[in-house]
Image: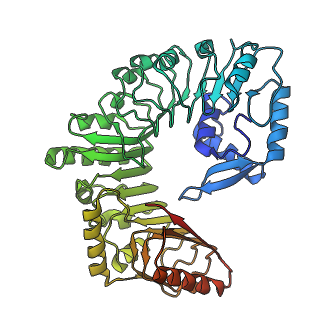
Amino acid sequence: SIFPKGCSINRRRLTRRWIAEGFIVEKDGKTVEEVAEDTFNELISRNIVRPVDHSRNGNVKAFQVHDMILEYILFKSSEENFITVVGGHWLTPTPSNKVRRLSLHSSNPEDARGKIETMNLSHVRSLTVFENLHQLPSYSLKSGILQVLDLEGCKSLNTSQLDKLCKMFHLKYLSLRRAYIKKLPAEIGKLQYLETLDIREADVVELPLSVGRLQKMVHLLGGNKSTRRALKFTEVIAKMTALQTLSGIEISKSSTPDLGSMHNLTKLKKLSILNIKDLHDNNQKYDDLLSAIEYLCGFSLKSLAIDDGFTGFLDSIEDLSTPPKYIHSLELSGKLTRVPGWIKELETLEKLTLSLTSLGTDMLLVLSQLPLLFSQTFSVIAKGQDHNVVEILHKNTMDSGGKIFVPADGFGNLKLLRFSSPVMPLLSFLERAMPELQRLELQFRLLEGVYGLENLESLQQVHLRVSQQPSEATRVKISCIRTSVSVHPNKPTVVADEYYE
């Protein structure tokens, strides 16, 4: 009920907020995160919320609430003084007693400020602001018992307002995602109860020294995938030993003098390295990073993503003495000229993304034997690295003879297959290939052809993303795909749209 009408809501944003406000508790031996997931899945199964986007492992990534259901939820929330909404499509009456949760939608700042000034905000536990902070009186940021502060996408955050955040000593959840900020206040270490800090797609690249005092921090989310600006991993971050999620970080020689400090993060379940810099001339640093990754995989790590920034680090990952056998999600991006030999041992792997990889039928034969693989993505997209991309595309063509055959049998659990490349080689699915595949996604500038779609027994959807202004030859190939799909017994849907490079 805090979100505007028609808003697409991120699942993790919601469940982490539930946990921060104490709505979810451990039960039946399950962690709070697992209970939150079960609770969310119940909302899905009861059709209370509607999925609008899925992640690559099949989980709901984002959802919407039907207008009629939202209106009812909002009415009940207002009736019980659960939340107060200012602005937006539906207005809740100003409560006669204390406001507990305040949600500010986009509206006239003067009108909003006038309404807020009549409210008793001394007991606000949760504050969510959409788009603009101008409508919020300055004293509103002084609430001492605030536990959730969600300013995702907010513009006009100034230094004074950021400094006030550091006095909200009971904060558990703080989101500054997509906010226009370049650094966090030096005093942020005072937020000793903080569990989630989301600074993704902001311009923060280094954390203050005081964050080392945040011993309850569970999720630290940083970096920007589209610009590849990342949060520098320092020994200060390594002091947050309760971390379970660490995403969007950069490993560099200057900011990370001691990679051994990463060994402290034994509770990590998800690690995402967005960039590696200045390590190519230091073999010891390569070895230290490999050692840290191998060490963490021996504890709780289930999801690992590495973009090596074309340093060549990924080729050294072949040298792991102990493969990450219990990993569920693996993403390797950058200058990856060969797939690690140990990948065939990953019997629990569900999601695999390989970027800038030499792709051929032989590799597909290896991957086809992974028993739980649910999602597979191959990508050759790298802005600003055209020379490297051309080299890898040429090598792909030489190795595969310009043709890739998806073998019969194998890939017994695969539901989603993605190819993303400027030039798509001829792709052919042999009889009995990928028996459970439901969705095929192809993104390309030029397409050689796709054959054997009729052999994909469970196919439900084909999604084609074509670079703007496709050639006449490409249009013909797309038409051939439509014709091939039209005779499939499942009558799969074909979606074709353009993307801009």
Quarter placement of the N terminus: top right
Residue found 45% across the figure and 65% down from its top: 377
Q: Nearer the viewer, residue 107 or 5?
A: 107
In terms of image quadrants, where is residue 403? bottom left
Image coordinates of residue 27 in percent, x first then y, are 65, 37
Can residue 144 be seen in the rendering of this structure?
no
Residue at the location (40% across, 20% down)?
213
Residue 307's place in the image compared with 21, above or below, is: below
- Lateral position of residue 298 relative to residue 46, left or right: left
User: Relative to 393, does residue 321 appear above or below in the rendering?
Assistant: above
Colouring rule applied to residues: rainbow
Q: Residue 244 in the image: x percent, y percent?
A: 46, 38
Say whether residue 345 is left or right of residue 480: left
The residue lying toward the viewer, choosing from 239 and 6, is 6
Left-right relation of 168 to 358? right
Q: Residue at x 43, y 23 (%)?
A: 214
Residue at (29, 65) in percent of width and height: 389
Residue 199 percent coordinates (x, y): 47, 34
The C terminus sits in image quarter: bottom left
* Residue 221 appears in the picture as rendered: yes
The quarter of the displayed image where residue 339 is located: bottom left
107 horizontally vs 188: left or right: right
The residue lying toward the viewer, choosing from 399 and 113, is 113
- Residue 310 position within the rendered picture, expressed as x and y whole percent measured from the top left: 26, 55
Classify 29 as above or below 466: above
